[in-house]
Image: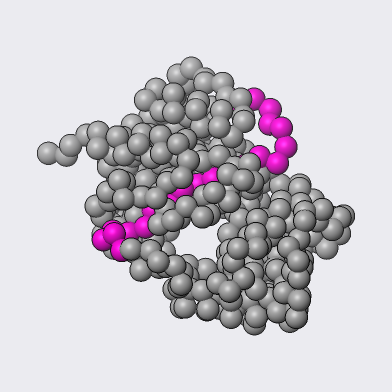
Amino acid sequence: MPSLSNVAHPAKRWAHELAHAQVEPSALPVAADFRIELPTQADAPAIARCFVEVYGSHYPHAEVFAPARYWASVERGELVPVIARDSAGMVVGHVALEREAGASVAERGEAVVLPAYRGHQLLELMTGRLAELAVALKLEGVYARPVTIHTFSQRNDLRNGMAFCAATLGLLPEDMLPKGLDIPTIGQRQSLLLAFHFLRPQAPRTIHAPDRYRAILAKLYAAIQAEVIFAGPQESAAAESTVASTLGDGGIGEIRVHAVGTRPAVELERILRDLVGRGAHYVSLSVPLHDPGTPALAEAARNSGFFFSGLGPGFAEGGDALLMQWLGTPIDTGKLQIYAEQARELVSFIDADRVGLPSKS
């Protein structure tokens, strides 16, 4: 979800940074008989076997099942992985940072621990090691997208100092489940939270926010420990909008606004109509909060059926993003498993904004 900035050879630069980063061995207490370390290329097939054992063939990041493709991502710097080994040297767990070109933040994901090795805090230990690598790579922050079919990942995020700043409703298929967990079916697509943590103190940021979202954005910035200043009304700086849109597998659409023009309603409605016509059942919308045209675009988005999704810290070029979403499938948020009160309040606001969308005649 961070920006798609064009940076000359960023992957090679990241790989060089990782190779030369001075990272001391983790001071975290490692459970007896386990080692937390960076993998080698020879570990790629074992990492694939971990994901097959836990998820079968249902996992959104297909590269983990293809050792050559997986390791190519590591060499390009797109993945920064950490593994857990048992006393025999077998890979029993994996977590990675996923980085996009030019982004100042990275996603912590691709997390797996073999069922027979759970209960040893391996996920927490690998997460701690990744935090050290993120600091060495001079990232501004790290985020995660915990599921809401259980609260295990959410609790791990809280223990690692994260706060929740967004939620995406109905993003994943209902049957995309890890094996070995007793999770009842609930008859709807899965929703995700967005947890975030800055790795260093942040300077105050000035944003252009719609009046209806100022209070919730102020709460979200406070939760991630960043000071925010709300700017007064200003005219859009760009005559024409700069927008990128994609439609991925499973009907997942994405709209990223890089600059807001003077006719946002017409442009946004045209793009949404195109994505839905091509089979999108979910469309995310990301708008830069430093753009003076964002309040007008957000109101236009609501008239097109988009509702509030949250805050994306560092998700836009040069700053943060207002996140919204359009949903073409029914979702009952009362069925979501949410651990933290702060996250429950956020989802409640999102649901109210969804219910309160203008009706289309």
Residue 330: % across, % down: 24, 52
Q: Nearer the viewer, residue 199 or 10?
A: 199
Judge whether residue 237 can be spotted in this image: no
Q: Quadrant of residue 176?
A: bottom left
Residue in the image at 75% along x and 80% along y: 88
Residue in the image at 64% along x and 46% along y: 160
Q: Nearer the viewer, residue 269 or 309?
A: 309
Residue in the image at 52% along x and 68% along y: 61
* Quadrant of image for the C terminus: top left
Q: Is residue 172 above or below residue 273?
A: below
Residue 357: % across, % down: 25, 36
Q: How is the image coloured?
A: one colour
Judge whether residue 341 can be spotted in this image: yes
Q: Is residue 23 above or below residue 166?
A: below
Q: Quadrant of residue 225?
A: top right
Q: Is residue 109 magenta?
A: no
Residue 327: % across, % down: 30, 50
User: Residue reaching furthest left?
Assistant: 361
Residue 46: % across, % down: 65, 80
Q: Report whether 361 appears left or right of 153.
A: left
Residue in the image at 47% along x and 52% along y: 151
Magenta span covers which residues? 185-205
Q: Nearer the viewer, residue 184 or 169?
A: 184
Q: Is residue 198 magenta?
A: yes
